[in-house]
Image (cartoon, rainbow, N blue to C red):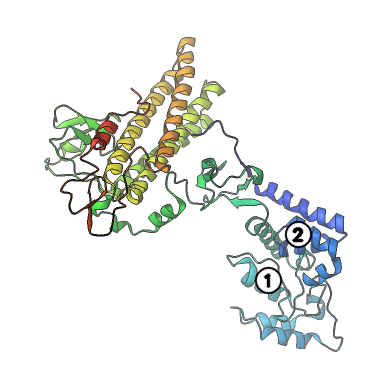
Amino acid sequence: MDYDREIPYSVLTRDEVSEKMKKQINDISEIFLVSKSDATVLLMSLRWDLLRVSERLSENKEKSLVDSGLKPDVIDTNLDSCSEISFETDVYEFEDDDADDDDNNDDDGDLISTPFCSHKFGTTYWTEYLEKNFYSVETVQTAISCPDENCRSAVGPDTIEKLTQRDQEMYERYVLRSYIEGNKVLMIKECPATDCNYVIEFHQENYDDNDEYSLNVVCLCGHIFCWRCKLESHRPVTCNNASDWLCRDTTNLSDESFSLPSININTKIMTCPHCLCPVESTITPQFLTCICRLSFCSRCLRSKEDHKFGSCVERDVGISCEERWGVCQNLLEQAKSDLEAFEESNTKNPSDLKEQDIMIIREGLMLIVQCRRVLKWCCVYDYFHTEYENSKKEYLQYLQENATVALQNYSNTLQEQKNVVLTSTTYEECSFFRHTIPTATSNIGNYFYHFIKTLQDGLVDVKVMSYNGGAGPFWYCDRCTYGNTWIATECEMCSDDISSLVEELSDFSLNKIP
């Protein structure tokens, strides 16, 4: 929905991230004449802060190496390997009860220690120690130390390379994970989508915490998520509200504060049970046809086809927030499926469409996915922001209805024009498509951009005066929430000229699409 802003992030593969990490290690190694193993340990211990590592090595290289466990301890020549093993095995316990026995049976040549201490352990013990204390834990440690609890000697690549191939691969993944998750300088995160290996790097110089565009990241895998909380994109809802909503027990979402006004069969506006678009009619026939082309019964809201089976039971229907969320989620999944089907069709059965036409259709389908996601999260916005502000609730529902209708109109237009261009034989038909759809895509994108901004600004078009009178009891108007003294028999807000605000808003249309 934003086409004219510079994207403030880069999408990288894990190999590209690994290359950036190795370059930092090589730079420290070459400039300060330390081994790559020591450079790795130094960077991990200081959370990959290149400037800080450089400053410490420049000020006092010897002290920096000692503090990081990269200087050898004094080796006691009277200490034999058996006493080392028995001393250590009393400290760490693993699930494999035979691990310590295996260590005791190892020859001295098979025992491995760091280059900086005399504590030797077998490869089996090393593997279990690393897996339990580092590789399998959720939080990445700044550095790995010797298994001996009293030893601060660092474990780096030069120690790991003496272990098995599996240990070396796990260590490499651990170091890369440390670079991504523990990096103090770079703003870098993994895409939270399942089975996605892309990594997102935010550019520090372009980052603005108040910038709306920085909230959402579009990964190359197609997943769109919030940079701050890594949940799916949830505009116009804040991270805290989105988290609270997803953690709620959905069985508690059907109280009055979550529901829309009841739909009466005698009203002039019905709500489509498929897409939630309002269906207007001067009369109320038994069957209504929505803009999404669904024909449904005005009495029981079942589709015309389903209505053939069983009798119609007239009922007063209220659509809860949970039901609206479910409907919007289904429409979002359908939009995703349409996009995936289009991409799969282009891959397996290439058409005669030019690349320009394919890009136009792809951008349109991607925009529909984004807009469907916004409409879904508007259900949450309604609950958290308009529970006690009826005038804002009415205005929000009005804006939602307009946005839903506008999006459905655009979706229908895109589908119709896509079918036309796929079977077109004349230049005029293709030319009309290439002009109409990009213009409509730009219009609907701008429409939803301003729709989101209106919600994020707090629906300021509806102004509610706050009560700041003197002490004493007062009552709140259930329409505009204005605080009135008990002397007033009518709401001072609703009874003056401002009372016409909601009626005026009902006639207001934002870029209404015919």
Going by the numbered disc 1, the residue's amino acid type is Thr
Q: Eyeballing the image, is 30 above or below 140?
A: above
- The disc placed on residue 127 is 1
- Where is residue 204 shown, x and y percent of the image? 65, 46
Instruction: Provide the secondary structure element on which disc 1 rests.
Output: helix
In the picture, measured across the screen, residue 295 lies left or right of residue 459, that is left
In primary-sequence order, the first of circles 1 and 2 is 2
- The disc placed on residue 245 is none
- Where is residue 241 shown, x and y percent of the image? 41, 53
Which residue was labeled with disc 2?
52
The structure residue drawn at horizontal position 44% and vertical position 38%, both measured from the top left corner, is 453
Q: Eyeballing the image, is 55 above or below 314?
A: below
In the picture, measured across the screen, residue 305 lies left or right of residue 342, that is left
Q: Eyeballing the image, is 506 above or below 426?
A: below
In depth, the one of 317 and 357 nearer the eye is: 317
User: Which image quarter: residue 103?
Assistant: bottom right
Give how far apart the Cα atoms at labels 1 and 2 are. 32 Å
